[in-house]
C-alpha cells in the first residue's frame, strides 16, 4: 500500500469520514442493476440520501416511480426508498452532490473472450468532469488485479485531484447472490482495499456504516484478486464435478448420491453439484479476467482453461443424453417435440444471462426438433444479443406433458410440480439431479 504524504490538516478524509459515520453523506451509486439496486436500498434504509445513476432511461423512470426492474426486489422496497429521498438519474453532473460514488457497472468479455472494461472507463470519463475534492470513489465491478490503479487512479490523478488527500479510491467486490434469501446485503462480509492507508480508512467508513463486517485487505489489487479467487474456486470445482458426473455415469454410479455422502465428512470437503453448464454474469466470465491479465506476466492459467473447457461442453453432453435416450425409444431427435423445463440460469430467479438452457435450446433446434419451454420466472423468451426464440412459457398440465417426446430439466425452480411431471412425461432428461430414484422415464444427464 502507498504511504500518504499529506498531513491531517490538508486531508479531506476526516470530514468525509465524519459524514459517512453520521450517515449525513450523500451516496451515489453508478449502475442500478443487480448489484447497484440492493446496495442503494441498503444505504437508503439506514438513513443515507442516495442518488442512483444509470444510462438506461426506462430503468430510471421505473425506479423513480417506485418500481423495481429486478424480480427478487420488491417494488415496495424501492417505493420506500423513494419516500426517503432516493432518486434515480442519468444526469452525471449530479455526481458533484455525492460524497461517495460507488461504481457497479457491467464487466463482460468481448467476442475474443477478453475483458471489456468499456463500461468502467465510460463511467469514469462521464464522472471525471464532475468530481470534486472530498469524495470517495469505490469500484465494485468484478475485474482483474490492477484495474483500480490503472484505470481509475490514473484518470483521477490526471484530472488534477490528489488521490489520498482530495479524493479517496477503493475497490470493494460485490458478493450479491440473487435469489438467496439466507443472506442480505448487510450480512455478507465486505472486502475492501484502498489505494493508500487513508483511502482504506475512508473505505472502511463507507461500508462500515451499512455492512455488519468489513474485511480490510492491503491493496486494491488484493481486493480485486479476492473476488476472482472466489469465483475461480467455484468454476474449477463445478468443472471437477461435471467431469466426475460423466465418469460416474459411465460406471453406473449416481454422482449426486456420492456428493451427498461425501458431504457428511465434517471437514475438508465442500459439496458442489454438476449441472447443464455455467450461467449468470459471474462464474462463466470472471475467471477469464485473470487468464487475460496473467498473460501479461507470461503465465497460463491452466485450471481456469480446463474447467472452462469441461463446463462449456455440458450443454452438448445433455443433448447427447437426450438424443441417445430418444434413440433407445426408436425416435430421432429431428422432428421430436421437446419441452425445456427452466430457462433462467439458476433456480428461482428470472436472470437469463449466459444461461446454459439457451445453449441447449440452440443445439436441439439445430437438430431439427420442435421446441417449447416452461419457466414460471420467464413468461416470454427475452431479447438476447445472440439468441432469438419466438416463444412464450407454456403452463404445465398432465395432458400437455404427455404430448412431448421428452422433457429436458435444465433449471430446478421450486415452482415446478416435479411429481406431476414424473407421472406424465414420457421421458425426462434430468441435468439437475432432481429425480434421485431410478425410473423408466428418467435419464440423468
Ligand atoms: N449480478 C451479480 O450477482 C453480481 C455479483 C457480484 C458481482 N457482480 C459484478 O457487478 C458488476 C455489475 O453487475 P450487475 O449484475 O449489477 O449488472 P447489471 O447489468 O444488472 O447492471 C449494470 C447497470 O449499469 C448500467 N450502466 C452501464 N453503463 C453505465 C454507465 N456508463 N453509467 C451508468 N450506468 C451504466 C446499466 O444500464 C445497468 O443498469 C459486474 O462487474 C458484475 O460482474 C455481479
Image (cartoon, rainbow, N blue to C red):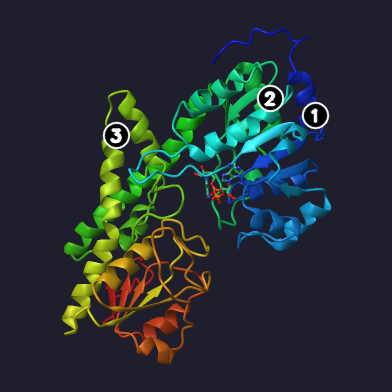
Pointer 3 residue: 301
Pointer 2 residue: 202
Examine the image and state in which quarter residue 1 appears: top right
Residue drawn at x 69%, y 32% is 206
Examine the image and state in which quarter residue 158 appears: top right
Instruction: Indicate the position of residue 407 as horizontal and vertical percent values.
Output: 34, 78
Mark 1 or mark 3: which comes first in sequence?
Answer: 1
Pointer 1 residue: 19
Q: How many marks?
A: 3
Q: Answer whether residue 176 is visible to the viewer in this image.
A: yes
Instruction: Indicate the position of residue 242 as horizontal and vertical percent values.
Output: 29, 55
**Is 174 displayed left or right of 389 in the figure?**
right
SS of the residue under disc 3: loop
Mark 3 or mark 2: which comes first in sequence?
Answer: 2
Quarter of the C terminus within the rendering? bottom left
Instruction: Indicate the position of residue 17 as horizontal and vertical percent values.
Output: 75, 25
Amino acid at each position: 500500500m502507498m504511504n500518504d504524504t499529506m498531513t491531517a490538516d490538508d486531508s479531506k478524509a476526516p470530514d468525509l469520514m465524519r459524514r459517512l459515520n453520521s450517515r449525513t453523506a450523500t451516496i451515489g451509486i453508478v449502475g442500478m442493476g443487480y448489484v447497484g439496486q440492493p446496495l442503494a436500498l441498503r444505504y437508503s434504509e439506514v438513513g443515507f440520501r442516495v442518488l442512483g445513476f444509470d444510462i438506461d432511461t426506462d430503468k430510471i423512470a421505473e425506479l423513480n416511480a417506485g418500481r423495481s426492474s429486478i424480480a427478487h426486489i420488491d417494488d415496495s422496497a424501492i417505493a420506500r426508498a423513494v419516500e426517503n429521498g432516493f432518486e434515480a438519474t442519468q444526469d452525471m453532473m449530479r455526481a458533484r452532490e455525492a460524497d461517495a460514488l460507488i461504481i457497479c457497472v457491467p464487466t463482460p468479455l468481448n467476442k475474443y473472450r477478453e475483458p471489456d472494461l468499456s463500461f468502467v472507463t465510460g463511467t469514469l470519463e462521464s464522472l471525471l468532469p464532475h468530481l470534486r475534492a472530498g469524495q470517495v470513489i469505490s469500484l465494485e465491478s468484478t475485474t482483474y488485479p490492477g484495474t483500480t490503479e490503472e484505470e481509475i487512479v490514473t484518470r483521477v490523478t490526471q484530472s488534477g485531484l490528489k488521490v489520498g488527500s482530495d479524493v479517496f479510491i477503493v475497490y470493494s467486490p460485490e458478493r450479491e447472490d440473487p435469489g438467496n434469501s439466507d443472506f442480505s446485503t448487510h450480512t455478507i462480509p465486505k472486502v475492501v482495499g484502498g489505494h493508500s492507508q487513508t483511502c482504506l480508512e475512508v473505505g472502511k467508513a463507507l461500508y462500515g456504516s451499512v455492512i455488519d463486517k468489513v474485511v480490510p485487505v492491503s491493496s486494491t489489487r488484493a481486493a480485486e484478486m479476492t473476488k476472482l479467487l472466489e469465483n475461480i474456486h467455484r468454476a474449477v470445482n463445478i468443472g471437477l464435478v461435471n467431469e466426475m458426473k460423466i465418469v460416474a455415469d459411465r460406471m453406473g454410479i449416481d454422482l449426486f448420491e456420492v456428493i451427498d455422502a461425501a458431504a457428511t465428512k465434517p471437514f475438508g470437503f465442500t459439496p458442489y453439484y454438476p449441472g447443464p453448464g455455467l450461467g449468470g454474469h459471474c462464474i462463466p466470465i470472471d475467471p477469464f479476467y485473470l487468464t487475460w491479465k496473467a498473460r501479461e506476466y507470461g503465465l497460463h492459467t491452466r485450471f481456469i482453461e480446463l474447467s472452462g473447457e469441461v463446463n462449456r461442453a455440458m450443454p452438448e453432453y445433455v443433448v447427447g443424453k437426450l438424443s441417445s435416450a430418444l434413440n433407445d425409444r426408436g425416435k430421432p431427435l429431428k422432428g421430436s417435440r421437446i419441452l425445456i423445463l427452466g430457462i433462467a440460469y439458476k433456480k428461482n430467479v428470472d436472470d437469463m444471462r449466459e444461461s446454459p438452457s439457451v445453449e441447449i435450446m440452440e443445439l436441439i433446434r439445430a437438430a431439427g426438433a420442435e421446441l417449447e419451454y416452461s419457466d414460471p420466472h420467464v413468461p416470454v423468451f427475452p431479447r438476447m444479443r445472440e439468441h432469438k426464440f419466438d416463444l412464450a412459457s407454456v403452463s404445465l398440465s398432465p395432458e400437455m406433458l404427455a404430448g412431448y417426446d421428452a422433457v429436458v430439466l435444465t433449471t430446478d425452480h421450486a415452482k415446478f410440480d416435479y411429481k406431476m411431471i414424473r407421472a406424465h412425461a414420457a421421458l425426462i432428461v434430468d441435468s439437475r439431479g432432481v429425480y434421485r430414484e431410478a425410473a423408466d422415464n428418467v435419464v440423468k444427464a
